[in-house]
Image (cartoon, rainbow, N blue to C red):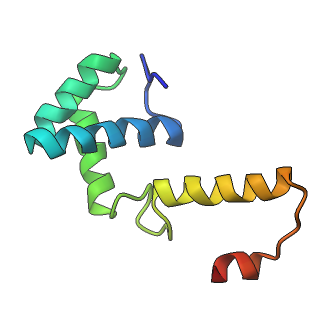
């Protein structure tokens, strides 16, 4: 999915951009350079400095959207996907049972 010209207002856009920066940081180990590269590739509507600061906040919050979130972006997507599948299969499941597993 392309985030071309995104302002990163949606959580999904942020997740995709931050995961892309994560991948680049594994290779180059320079967060600012990774942010510049992703910014240029996606032609984001925010500045490189703003992207860099948002990414640092994301890292400081243990890769969560907010510090008070229980799950990371990836975990939330997995949970939503699992619940969606249960709904599509028309199988009721209690929330307590889901959270225990």
- Left or right, residue 30 beside residue 55: left
Image: 68 above or below 57: below
Q: Give how far across and how far down residue 86 sits, in percent.
A: 79, 59
- Left or right, residue 5 beside residue 79: left
Image: 23 above or below 86: above
Name the residue rendered at 26%, 39% in the picture: 21
Name the residue rendered at 49%, 25% in the picture: 1
Q: Residue furthest front?
A: 89
Q: Give how far across and how far down residue 87 sits, in percent.
A: 84, 55
Name the residue rendered at 57%, 52% in the picture: 77
Q: Give how far across and how far down residue 93 sits, in percent.
A: 83, 72
Image: 37 above or below 18: above
Q: Give how far across and how far down residue 95 sits, in percent.
A: 76, 75
Q: Who is closer to the viewer here, 67 or 63?
A: 63
Count all numbered tags in the image, as a single digit: 0
Would you identify the image quadrant in which residue 43 lies? top left
Q: Image quadrant for the C terminus? A: bottom right
Name the residue rendered at 31%, 36% in the picture: 20
Would you identify the image quadrant in which residue 76 lies? bottom right
Image: 11 above or below 81: above
């Amino acid at each position: 999915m392309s985030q071309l010209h995104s302002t990163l207002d949606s959580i999904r856009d942020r997740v995709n951009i931050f995961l892309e920066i994560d991948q680049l940081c594994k290779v180059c180990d320079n967060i600012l350079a990774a942010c510049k590269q992703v910014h240029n590739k996606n032609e984001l509507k925010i500045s490189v400095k703003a992207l860099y600061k948002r990414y640092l906040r994301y890292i400081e919050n243990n890769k969560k959207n907010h510090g008070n979130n229980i799950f990371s972006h990836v975990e939330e997507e997995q949970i939503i996907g699992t619940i969606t599948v249960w709904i599509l299969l028309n199988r009721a499941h209690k929330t307590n049972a889901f959270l225990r597993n």
